[in-house]
Image (cartoon, rainbow, N blue to C red):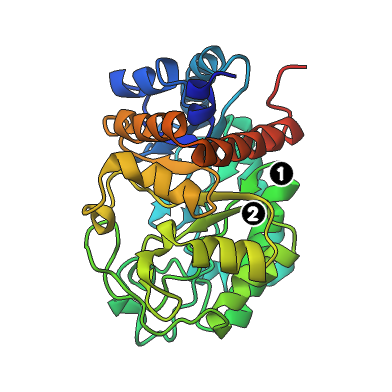
Amino acid sequence: MSLEQRAGQVMMVGSPVAGPDAAVRDAVGRLHVGNVFLKGRTTAGANAVAGVVAALKGEAVRGSGGAAPFVATDQEGGQVQILRGPGFSEMPTALAQGSMDAGALRASAAAWGRELAAAGVNVNLAPVMDTVPSAAFAPQNAPIGRFQREFGYSPQTVSAHGIAFAHGMADAGVAAVPKHFPGLGRVTANTDTAAGVADGTTGRHDPYVAPFADAVRAGVQWMMISNARYPAIDPENDAVFSPTVIGGMLRGDLGFRGIVVSDDVCDAVQLSSTAPEQRGVGFLAAGGTMVLCTNAQTAPRLWQGMVDRARSDPAFARTLNAAALAVLEAKDRAGLLPR
């Protein structure tokens, strides 16, 4: 692959679930972006989604020299369920899922995963494995508790049910992506819509990190990084740019060897003080693998920043190459490379 194609492999671009627009086609074609996130909402059903995925896959394969894309969406349940309509079950909130027997949840998640797989989706950006401290605090926790995205109010409940959900997805051949490491359950503001979001409580060996550690031990192959800042862990960097959070904690303390994907870095207000050209560079340099950009109009700036840095900085070029190789190895295991 060319440098430009390798940079594309370490990106995931957002496409409207109703079908790609010109900006998405440009990203997947001209920029060789090798992975796609279905965003928005649809009630059109599985057949319509499968058609959109097939079109995106065809364009991605051409742009990536034969490598098929990872196609992701947010299919958590409750208010966070992008795909609805015929062929997709109505999924309960994570909080309701947390009241289920873990075995029953795994079986349900496998059924939901089979629905995704039938539509061509092979990555689910779920489960949420953030622990919200209490039901009383939940309404104040804008990104998670306000929408009942938490499985419960103890790390043990979150671990048991998050892992059951992840295993069910894996049973269906869909990669689950626990999020948002090292946890968003204690914040009040949402990094998508606010800047300066910080969790001043969570430390490097905090009990609320345990669900993510348990997920790693359970064999998950993907993990999503939070955009918030954790001053007790790294007072200088948001987690998505933190070598301590990604390299030290996730890679080091937890021993995770899979795909580390960012939360959205293109529209997140939290990251607005960092130029888009520096966001992908910063994430990969901190130890990340694949950068998620839900805004295809911003994707060229993100991509160009990584390409330019790789051309001028041999150390970063090696970092980008290693990330691209990790993505391609994961695609090989998933049967997404040409045989």
Q: Residues within 10 Å of mark 1 (few under 14, many from 20)?
A: many
Alpha carbon distance from label 2 to label 1:
8 Å
The image quadrant where one finds the C terminus is top right
Compared to residue 91, the image places residue 133 above or below, namely: below
Q: Earlier in the sequence, mark 2 or mark 1?
A: 2
Which corner quadrant of the image does residue 231 belong to?
bottom left
User: In what element is the residue under mark 1?
Assistant: loop
Estimate the x, y position of residue 90 in percent, counting from the top left.
49, 50
Q: Which residue is mark 2?
A: 109
Compared to residue 293, the image places residue 134 above or below, namely: below
Q: Residues within 10 Å of mark 2 (few under 14, many from 20)?
A: many
Q: Which residue is mark 1?
A: 172
- Residue 179 placement, left or right of 271: right
Residue at 63% across, 61% down: 251
Label 2–label 1 contact, CB within 8 A: yes
Q: Does residue 339 show up?
A: yes
Residue in front for this viewpoint, 90 or 165: 165
Residue in front for this viewpoint, 226 or 318: 318
Kind of residue indicated by mark 2: Ala
User: In what element is the residue under mark 2?
Assistant: helix
Compared to residue 123, the image places residue 250 above or below, namely: below
Estimate the x, y position of residue 24 in percent, counting from the top left.
36, 24
Kind of residue indicated by mark 1: Ala
Estimate the x, y position of residue 175 in percent, counting from the top left.
64, 46
Q: Does residue 128 show up?
A: no
Residue at 46% across, 33% down: 310
